[in-house]
Image (cartoon, rainbow, N blue to C red):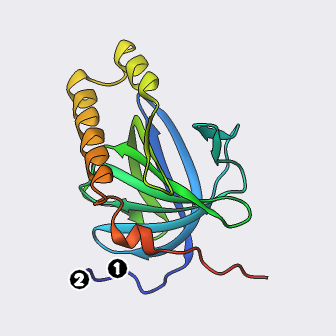
């Protein structure tokens, strides 16, 4: 059982993501839960252009995501919904693990994205995304070979866990969006 760090839930938070070598992006969301080992953040998606996987739009501006970010894990995972509230699937980023999740009450540490992503459909089919981005980062020396190989190894592990239905975790599968306020 994890103790909540602060009982004030549903407050605004900024998630900070760093893409190697030095691209930093910030996303606003609502902090739903914060423990020493996990953050749950609900946020609206804003993208330059829709993201499609196997012919289906999985992320677009105005879609909703519920993110689970864990300390000491090589991934985060988002549960994605379209504008009508229909659940679409799970989006996993391979990230460099961090020990501490928050800088302060309203801002996360910078999570380092390691390029590789995994999209898991509603029926459990998994698609690897952005392998080309990792290859480019290796060529550009934006990521070390050892870190790139570890990211690939961690992605294969998630694929295996997805295939055996052990991933995503039960808490991710069970969560629902916050009720909309009028």
Quarter that holds the C terminus: bottom right
Q: Where residue 70 appears, x then y in whole percent?
A: 32, 61
Task: Classify 168 as above or below 33.
Answer: above
Where does the image place residue 12, in percent across and percent down from the top left? 58, 70
Quadrant hosting residue 117: top left
Quadrant of image for the N terminus: bottom left
- Number of numbered discs visible in the structure rendering: 2
Q: Residue furthest right?
A: 182
Residue for badge 2: 1
From this viewpoint, which residue is outermost toward the bottom?
7
- Give left or right: position of 179 versus 161: right
Q: Which residue is mark 1?
A: 5
* Label of residue 114 in the image: none
Horizontal placement of 67 versus 55: left or right? left
Quadrant position of residue 95: top left
* Image side of residue 170 versus residue 129, left or right: left
Above or below for 1 versus 70? below
Q: Image height check: is 181 above or below 129?
A: below
Residue placed at 27% from the left, 39% from the top? 156
| Residue drawn at 51 percent across, 57 percent down | 122
Judging depth in this view, the residue of 90 and 141 nearest the camera is 90
């Amino acid at each position: 059982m994890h103790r909540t760090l602060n009982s004030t839930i549903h407050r605004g938070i900024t998630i900070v993501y760093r893409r190697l070598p030095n691209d930093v992006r910030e996303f606003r969301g609502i902090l739903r839960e914060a423990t020493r080992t996990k953050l749950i953040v609900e946020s609206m998606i804003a993208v330059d252009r829709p993201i499609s996987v196997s012919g289906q739009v999985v992320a677009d501006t105005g879609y909703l995501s519920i993110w689970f970010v864990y300390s000491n894990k090589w991934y985060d995972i988002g549960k994605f919904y379209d504008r009508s509230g229909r659940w679409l699937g799970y989006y996993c980023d391979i990230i460099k693990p961090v020990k501490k999740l928050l800088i302060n009450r309203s801002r996360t540490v910078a999570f380092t994205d390691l390029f590789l992503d995994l999209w898991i459909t509603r029926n459990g089919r998994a698609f690897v995304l952005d392998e080309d981005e990792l290859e480019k980062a290796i060529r550009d020396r934006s990521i070390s070979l050892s870190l790139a190989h570890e990211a690939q190894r961690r992605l294969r592990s998630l694929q295996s866990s997805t295939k055996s239905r052990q991933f995503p975790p039960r808490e991710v599968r069970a969560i629902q969006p916050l009720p909309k306020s009028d």
